[in-house]
Amino acid sequence: MSSEEGVFEGATATGTRLRSRSHFPPKWSDAVFVLLFVAVAFLFARTYMSAEHFFYFWDFAAYTDLLAQATAGIRDTGIRQGLLSIHASTEGEYNQYFTLPLLPFALPLGGLTRVRFVEALAVLYVVPLCLVAGSITASLFSTAEDERRKRALFWLGATFCLLLPATWSAVLRAYPDVFACFFALLAVSLYCNRGMKFSLPRAIGIGACLAATMLLRRHFTYPALAFYGAFVIHQAVLVWGDPERSPWFGRFKVAVSRGLLVFGGHISVLLIFGKPFVRNLFRNNYYELYTSYLSPLPVLVQFFGGCLGWSIVAVACLGWITAFVIKKRPAQQTELLFPFLFCVLLGGIWMFAVRQTGPHYLLHFLLFLIIGLTGLTLLPKGRVIAGAMVALLGLNMLNLALPPERSPIPEVVRPFLAAPRPPLYRRDYAEMTRYMATLRTLAAPDHSVFVGGSSERINNDLLSHTDPGLPGLLAPGSPAATLPPVRFVGSPHVDSRDRYPLEPLLESDIVSLPFPAETHLAPKEQKVVLMSGRLFGEKSPVTIRETDTPQADTIATLFQRDFVALPQSFTMENGTRLRLYRRVRPTPILTAARTLAWMRDVTDGKTPGGQNRWVGLTPSVHIEPEEDARYHITAYVPPSKASSKARQSEQAVAGFAYIGKSRTLRIISSEAAPARLQAFVSDARREMPQPVSITITTEGKNTVGVVKVPPL
């Protein structure tokens, strides 16, 4: 029976069930190999993590936080309600489904430390991923009759997966993306297993795997799209590739029915377990939100080639060529066609459409490397080649895990190996601890703190995650250890996703800024970060280039009048100094309006992706977008900040500005503490904002005002 007949065998009522080409009777040696994989994964993760000394933030801390939330939810509300909360988490940008295999270990321990979290990822996610990778290589390169070769290819593919830097780059940063990758590869394995009858359970299983990979990590939507693209092309080749075998129309109907079954299973699982996730996919323009993260093709090639390892990529390409050459028969080449199409389509989507970089995105190229490396062992003296491949991967892993200054690998060789990703370690750990203790000392309980900067060295999320546990980092008896945690306002980071820094700056009592400015993307994509520094006199060449306007120095002088520079400063490991400022008076509304006009000038009138059309010009205004381009604005006076009549009078003025196309807004203010309302509108030419009139009427228990903005 040809491979095409094996593929279509399940469509006929008389078809017989073939023995799986990637499965074989287990032996005791298989159990030994599994235990060996578990031991290697566990020990590598523990050794690596024990060398870290770092403050975690953003995605480095997000997934341990989500596990802690899921654990607390089940512990506090019970299993049923906790699982419902996990399902409800699909409403957000990050959900908690990945925590399900971890919860049996986290619940008895009351949670997992970061080291245990990474160890759990290594054992529970990486090892199964390796086994699925082995099933794919065994299915593609062995025959049903040769059980010994099948087993060898299985463990060879699994070993390659275990030793590839692409497998570990995300895990070592505490990303659970390997769990999503497991389901993506499982879908490929189910499809490539020619010996299995293409039954209803198999089709639904493939669809369920594609749904799971999307739900676990949103960027794995692209492997699902690549799977369908490869599926359509591969089925078309099978339908029209051999016109003499049987009428094409019958084979076409079978191919369509299979596609519908897979898609039916896919969409059913998505709607049952992630309806809010699907709604967000259609509601949000993620491409526009993450425009600032897009990189040009040369940068992408350099990043992925360097992180995957140029030597590994080159060998994998040779392996694919070898596999297609050795499998000369069309039927054999057709077997390789689907995974090849899947890898090529996924790589093309990523390099030409998605265009983002990150350690977790390396997983999208994992299957290409595994199959390519295995394909090279089809040559004569395959055992010798396999040994050489293991040695090459080991060398790449060594270069990945060791700091460059401690690596024994000759420098001339390193550019061809996977880029170093050593344990995270801060040489300025003590200085940063002193900095955070000082912030606690300076900030009163009702004060808000703005932290500028957006890099791995300094950002507001780093401090938000570290400050609650600060007492454990301080010496016994330290005064800062007894003080309450600091309240940090959300500072913007990325132009395409966030907002102008004006509102959080107006709300802040303490401002901390790096000199020079710190960014993690191209500075032109993080002008919302550079603006805050420019307002306080940070004039590095990058900041000047991206924020300079004729009014920049004038606006900075006006804005700084409401703050006083504090004598404390701190030096980070790269020489950047952290400076502190304390607010001495509220910023006048007119100054805030002029500052907003300057910020719009810096961005050339292009509004940041997360910016509301109505902008608060006083901290007493809270703005929330509603449907139909409407905004709900709440005016309030924080009682704790009204310590004097003069301050209360100033805070009672509620100011806001319009920068969008909307012409009406609804204001609700407390009847007990009515606010004087003042609004500004800035036209498309970004000239001086002009005040607009406000009509106040009474409606029920609330004071409601409707602002009619005159046409521009």
Image: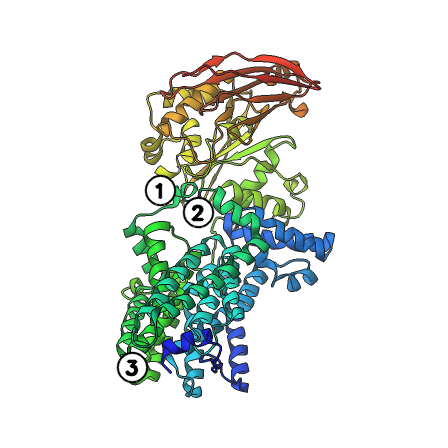
Query: Of marks 2 and 3, which one's residue comes earlier in the chain?
Result: 3
Badge 1: how crowded within 10 Å, few (<14), some, or many (20+)? few
The answer to whether one can see residue 171 in this image is: no
Q: Which element type, helix, strand or loop, lies under badge 3?
A: loop
Residue visible at 48% across and 13% down in the picture: 691
What type is the residue that disc 2 sits on? Glu
Residue named by callout 3: 379
Residue named by callout 1: 522
Residue visible at 47% across and 33% down in the picture: 499
Which of the 4 quarters of the picture holds residue 328? bottom left
Residue 634 placed where, x, y %? 61, 25
Quadrant in which the N terminus appears: bottom left
What type is the residue that disc 1 sits on? Ala
Residues under labels 1 and 2: Cα distance? 21 Å
What type is the residue that disc 3 sits on? Leu
Left/right of residue 654 with respect to residue 322 in the rendered view: right
Residue visible at 42% across and 59% down in the picture: 223
Residue visible at 68% across and 41% down in the picture: 482
Residue 568 placed where, x, y %? 51, 34
Residues under labels 2 and 3: Cα distance? 50 Å
The answer to whether one can see residue 1 in this image is: yes
Which of the 4 quarters of the picture holds residue 410? bottom left
Badge 2: how crowded within 10 Å, few (<14), some, or many (20+)? few
Q: Residue 573: which numbered mark, if any?
A: 2
Query: Of marks 1 and 2, which one's residue comes earlier in the chain?
Result: 1
Question: For the residues carrying marks 1 and 2, which lies nearer the camera in this image?
Answer: 1
